[in-house]
């Protein structure tokens, strides 16, 4: 899944906001009374949030690396 496949509402989230939503989704997925269709869409959103967080870390890593080279 490339960065351009991540919805705009996820791309605009800070790391803290994305993590909070991930925690909420994980709580829902752990509930055994959730139906399969809802769980599948929640899981897809979880994957997108995870990709977004990964991109945020990569950007921050590049910034830190650039600053250390100076």
Image (cartoon, rainbow, N blue to C red):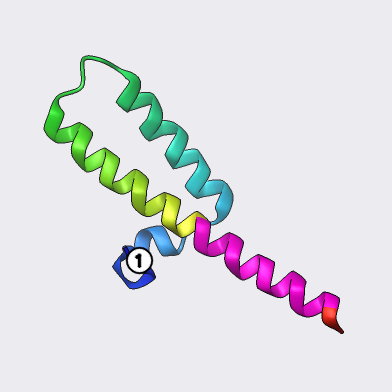
Q: Which residues are magenta?
A: 54-68
Q: Quadrant of the N terminus?
A: bottom left
For residue 46, what is the image quadrant? top left
Q: From the viewer's perspective, is residue 8 above or below residue 36?
A: below
User: What's the residue at 46%, 33% (across, down)?
Assistant: 23
Q: From the viewer's perspective, is residue 41 above or below residue 69?
A: above
Q: Residue 63: give x, y in percent of width and height.
A: 71, 74
Q: Which residue is mark 1?
A: 8
Q: Helix or strand or loop: what does disc 1 sit on?
A: helix
User: What's the residue at 14%, 24% (across, down)?
Assistant: 35
Q: Residue furthest bottom?
A: 70
Determine crowd level at label 1: few under 14, some 14-19, many 20+ residues with C-alpha closer than 10 A: few
Q: Report the number of numbered marks.
A: 1
Residue 62 magenta-highlighted: yes
- In the rendered structure, the answer to whether residue 1 lies left or right of residue 61 reads left
User: What's the residue at 31%, 47% (across, down)?
Assistant: 45
Q: From the viewer's perspective, is residue 40 above or below residue 55?
A: above
- In the rendered structure, the answer to whether residue 67 lies left or right of residue 51 reads right
Task: Between residue 61 and residue 21, name the one nearer to us.
Answer: 61
Q: Quadrant of the C terminus?
A: bottom right
User: What's the residue at 55%, 56% (across, down)?
Assistant: 14
For residue 27, what is the image quadrant? top left
């Amino acid at each position: 899944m490339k960065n351009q496949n991540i919805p705009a509402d996820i791309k605009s989230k800070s790391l803290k906001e994305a993590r909070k939503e991930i925690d909420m989704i994980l709580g829902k997925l752990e509930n055994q009374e959730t139906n399969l269709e809802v769980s599948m869409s929640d899981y897809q959103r979880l994957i997108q949030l995870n990709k977004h967080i990964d991109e945020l870390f990569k950007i921050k890593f590049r910034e830190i690396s650039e600053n250390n080279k100076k």
